[in-house]
Image: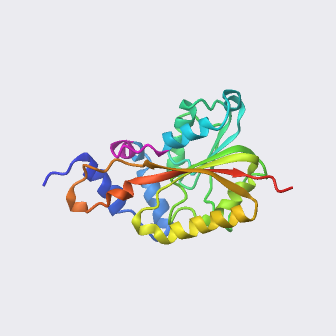
Amino acid sequence: MTQTPLDEVYRKTFHVFPNDNPADIMKYYNKNGTTYDSTMKTMTYIAPDVAAQKAASLVSDKQKENFKLLDLGAGTGLSGAALRRSGFLGNISALDGSAEMLKVATEKGIYSDSTEHILTSSNPLPYPDHSFEMVVSVATFTKHLMEPDCLEEVLRVLKPHSYMIITIRMYSEVQDYKVRFYDELDRLEAAGLMKICSSEKFPYYKWDKISDEFKVNLADQYGDVLVLQKLDIN
């Protein structure tokens, strides 16, 4: 049976993805950095635009001209490009753990600066407190990439009353991660560190025409865009 381009990229992205070893995951991203954008286009990946449009809806045009913004898990710069299209003209910093993906991102000329860094609970962000007026994180908080216990560290670099926009896709194989993620949100909210302003479902990908051989759970093509606001506890 002849495979469609969508079948081919689905197999490449979800059937050969290394799910356990962090070093293998980074090797995978470094290897596929130059083809990532075309792969995501084939799958009608709209998370970067959804996040950027949500971010733009939260602030004024004047703020967009001057905001200092962090693209957390910038990858190849899809979200940075979407933010620029949505009117963010100020400084956008890119941070990602994949050197090759970050190279693709910086070559697009959309970032003010870029940093190769893998955020973990024991490897904090390389920025001072209150460095950014907004953080956007697209498809970064997911199993084997960024753990929920990193959320508080991201809040640290946000200015009080500023927003963090996160897109997540809690597909059927990561329900354990989903529990930990939302438990951490509940903990941070109970501690008065932030509040959940909104959560909206949207189609991350368009998988309706993927071959039946993959036995795709079509519910897994959907994700959520969350808006979190850092609170001032002083």
Is residue 89 at least partly visible in the picture?
A: yes
Q: Left or right: 189 with respect to 85?
A: right
Up/down of 27 relative to 56, above or below: below
| Magenta stretch contains residue 46 | yes
Foreground of the two, 127 or 60: 60
Foreground of the two, 50 or 145: 50
Up/down of 140 relative to 182, above or below: above
Foreground of the two, 201 or 120: 201
- Which corner quadrant holds the C terminus? bottom right
State the image quarter where residue 117 is shown: bottom right
Residue 93: image x %, image y %? 65, 42
Foreground of the two, 13 or 35: 13
Residue depicted at x 67% and y 41%: 69
Q: Left or right: 189 with respect to 173?
A: right
Residue depicted at x 36% and y 60%: 14
Q: How many marks?
A: 0
State the image quarter where residue 113 is shown: top right
Q: Left or right: 234 with respect to 162?
A: right
Residue depicted at x 53% and y 44%: 103
Q: Main secondary structure of the magenta part?
A: helix
Residue depicted at x 68% and y 28%: 65
Up/down of 198 relative to 149, above or below: above
Q: Residue furthest right?
A: 234
| Magenta stretch contains residue 19 | no
From which residue to which does the magenta span run? 38-47
Residue 9: image x %, image y %? 31, 51
